[in-house]
Image: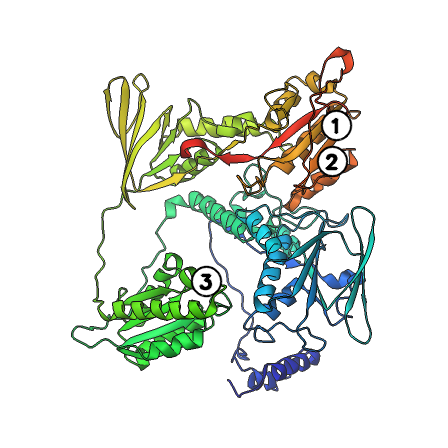
Amino acid sequence: MNLGYTAEEARAEAARCLQCGVCSECLSCYYKCAAGAIHHNQVAREEKIEVGAVILASGFELYDAHLSGEYGLGRYANVLTSQQYERILSPSGPYGGHLKRPSDSHEPKRIAWIQCVGSRRADRNWCSAVCCMYATKQTILTQEHAPGTDCTVFYIDFRAHGKGFDAYYERGRSSGVRYVRAMPSAIKEAATTKNLELQYVLPDGQLVTETFDMVVLSVGLQAPRGMTHLAQEINVTTLPNGFCYANTLAPVSTTREGVYVCGPFAEPKDIPETTISASAAAARAMTLLAEGRHTLVSPKEYPPEIDVTGLPPRVGVFVCHCGTNIAGVVDVAAVTEYARTLPNVVYADHTLFTCSTDSQAKIRAAVKEYNLNRVVVASCTPRTHEPLFQNCIREAGLNFYLFELANIRDQCSWVHRDFPEAATEKAKDLVRMAVAKARLMEPLQRKSLEFNHDALVIGGGLAGMTAALELADQGFKVSLVEREKELGGNMRHLRVLLSHADPQGLLHSITRRTLLHPNIHTFLDVEIASFEGSVGKFKTTIHSPAHLPLPGGEAFSKNGVTTSVIHHGVVIVATGAQPYQPTEYLYGKDERVWTQLELENAIADPPSTISNLKSIVMIQCVGSRTSERPYCSRLCCGQAVKNALEIKKINPEIEVYVLYRDIRTYGLMEQYYRQAREAGVLFLRYEAEQPPHVGAGLAPARDGQHVGAGLAPARDGQHVGAGLAPARDGQQ
C-alpha cells in the first residue's frame, strides 16, 4: 500500500518496529511501507522436497568493518563500506545517484579507498578476490558522476586477475585514479569539517599524511554465518575458515556424493567465476540425474495469441536507464518524449531497469491498457535481452516477433560517453529506426526443426576431456578431436599442485575414462579442415594421416590423408593456451634460464638437479601485462609460490627470490603465499618501467657447476615466470 510516505519516514518506522522486540500486530509497518511488501498473514511453514542432488550456493557475507575499529566506521559519518558507497552511486540509492557525503550532503572532492579490510590478515588468511576490481569500478563511476573528483586507492597488491581486468585497471589509472601501494593504519576525523586524515608509509619509508572528504573501506568476503551448522546437518565438511571444502581436482564436489558447491561459499570468487562454477555444479547434478531428464518438466503455458491482422500499428516504446549505464550519458527523458512524437506510437515511458520483474509487469500492463500490438524497448544488447522481452510480450498475448530492440547502450552510451548531446541524438535515431521497423512487423510462427544432439569437443586437454565426459555420462554422443598424438594438453607437464593433489594421477584416470567411454569417439593427430552449418545441425570435416583409424562419421582416404565428416548439434572449443616462449632474460641463450614448467620438471625428476643450487631467482610477469599481451596470466604467481615451496622442501638453505609486480594469489591461494614467506622465500617488487636485468656473467656453483645468470640480488640462479598465450591456430 503506497500512502505517499517518504523513504526517510519508512526507515524511521522500520527502526521503531525493530526496537519493539515482539510484534504486537499494530500494522503501522503495513501502512508505512510504500512498496506494499508487508504481509502479516504469512506464517512459518515446513516443507519436505524429494531431490536427487543438492547444490550449495549460499554465497557470502561481507566482513563487518566495525571490527576494524581503527578506521572509525560507525563513529565517523564519512567513513563508508564499499557496499554503502555502491548504494550512494546507485540511481535508486538514498541520493538518487548523486554523489554526496553523509555528514553534510556536499559533493566530496577527494575520496580514498582502503583495500583488504577484513582480508589478508593472520586471522583471515585469504584474498577476497573482488575488492581490487570493485574499487576500480567505483572510482571510474565516481569520475563519471562527478568529473574532477580526486580518487586514491591504497592497496598492498593489485589483483586484476580476471579476463579484461588489467585493461580496466589501466583505464582507471589513465583516467586519473591514483594508486598508492601503502596501507593506512588508522583514520582521524577533524571535528569541525568532518574531513578524514590518513597516515601511511610509502615503500621507501617516507611517512605521509593526507586529508580526504570521504573514505571507502573495501570490505572482503567471508563464508555465510550458519552455513557450518547446515553443512554438518547434510554431512559435508567445511574448512576452519568457514568456507566449504571442495575437491581440488573436482572443485564443485564436496565430501558427500550428490552434494555440490558453487560460488563464493567454496572460496571467494567474482561474478564470472561464480557463474562458471554454478554451471559446473549444474552439469554434475545433471549427470547424476541423467536418467530422470525431462520426467518432471511441464511446458510453459501462454495466453491465447492476440490476432493483430489488419489492425493499425499501436506501438509502445520503453526506454531503459540501465542505472547509469545509459542514463549517465543519454538524456533518457528526452528520448522518451521524442518517441511519443513518432508515427503510431501510442505509449512511451522510461524505466530504471526495463529488464527487471517490475518493469516487465509494467510492459504487460501497458499492452493491455493501451491495446499495444507492437513493442519497442530501447536498452542494451539483443544478444542477452531480446528473448527476455519477447517472452514478456508473449505473456501479454502478443506474438514473439512483434518486438524490436534498439541497442542504445552498446551502440550509443558506451561508445559516445564523452559526447552526451550527440549520444542523445543518436539514441533518438536508433529509436526512430526501431519504431519504423516495428510498424512493418507481422506475426511469425515458430516451428520445430530436427536437432542433432551429438556434440563436438575441440581440444583434448583437461578441459576438453572433462566436458566430453560430462556430456557422455549424460547419454550424449561426443566426438573429441585433438591435434596432438596424445590427450592431456598442458596437464602432461604438471607434477604437483599447491594443494599437493596429484595432477598426473588425475590425468591418467580421466584419459583412461575418455578413451574407454562408449559415448566418446576420440580423434587424435587430426586437423579441422572445414566447419559449416547452424545451431543444432553442424558439419565438421577433419583430416588425419591415412594409417590412423577414425571411428564414426563419414570417412574416406585420398592422397595419403584420411578425411572424416562429423555431424553434431553443438561444439565446445577447449583449445586451451600455451606457455609464452621468452626472448628476454637470456632465455634460450643460457641453459640456466628456465621457464616455470621446466623448473617444475627439474624439481620432480631428479631432485638432485635443484638440491645443489645456492640460489634461484624467479621473475614474474614475463610475457604478461605487456602492450602485446595486456592481461594477467592468472596462474604464474601461484606457480612461483608452489615451486618456491617445493625448492625449500628439497633444501631449506637454497636462497629463493621472487621478483614481482603484484603477487596475485587470489582466493584461498593466499595461505600458500604466507607459507612461502614463512619458509624464507624473499619477495622483491619491481616496477614495470624498471624491469630486472639479467647479465651474462657466470658464477661457479658448488661442485664447480655453473648454475646462475648473475642476476642481482641473487648470486647465481634465475628462472623466468612466463605467462600464457592463446593456443596457435585455435587448437591445443
Sequence-first disc among 2 and 3:
3
Amino acid carrying label 2: it is Ala
Residue situated furthest left in the rendering: 310
Proximity of marks 2 and 3: CB atoms separated by less than 8 Å: no
Q: Which residue is mark 3?
A: 416
The residue at the point 46 percent across, 67 percent down is 326
Query: Which residue type carries mark 3?
Result: His
For marks 3 and 1, give the CA distance. 54 Å
Mark sitting on residue 676:
2
Q: Measured from the top left, where is residue 211 in percent x and y? A: 77, 65
Question: Percent from the top left, x then y, of residue 195?
Answer: 77, 70
Q: Secondary structure at mark 3?
A: loop
Residue at (77% x, 11% y) in the render: 703
For the C terminus, give its image quadrant. Answer: top left
Foreground disc of the pair 2, 3: 3
Tag 1 secondary structure:
helix
Query: Residue sitting at 28 percent across and 64 percent down?
Result: 400
Residues packed near mark 1 inside 10 Å, few (<14), some (14 to 19) or many (20 plus):
some
Please name which of the two marks, 3 or 1, marks the residue nearer to the observer. 3
Image location (x, y in percent) of residue 476: 34, 39
Mark 1 and mark 2 in contact? Answer it, CB < 8 Å: yes
Instruction: Name the residue that disc number 1 marks.
Output: 648
Q: Give residue 562's position: percent from left, percent from top.
A: 28, 22
Give me the C-alpha separation between circle 2 and circle 3.
47 Å
Q: Earlier in the sequence, mark 1 or mark 2?
A: 1
Residue 379 vertical placement versus 575 (above, below):
below
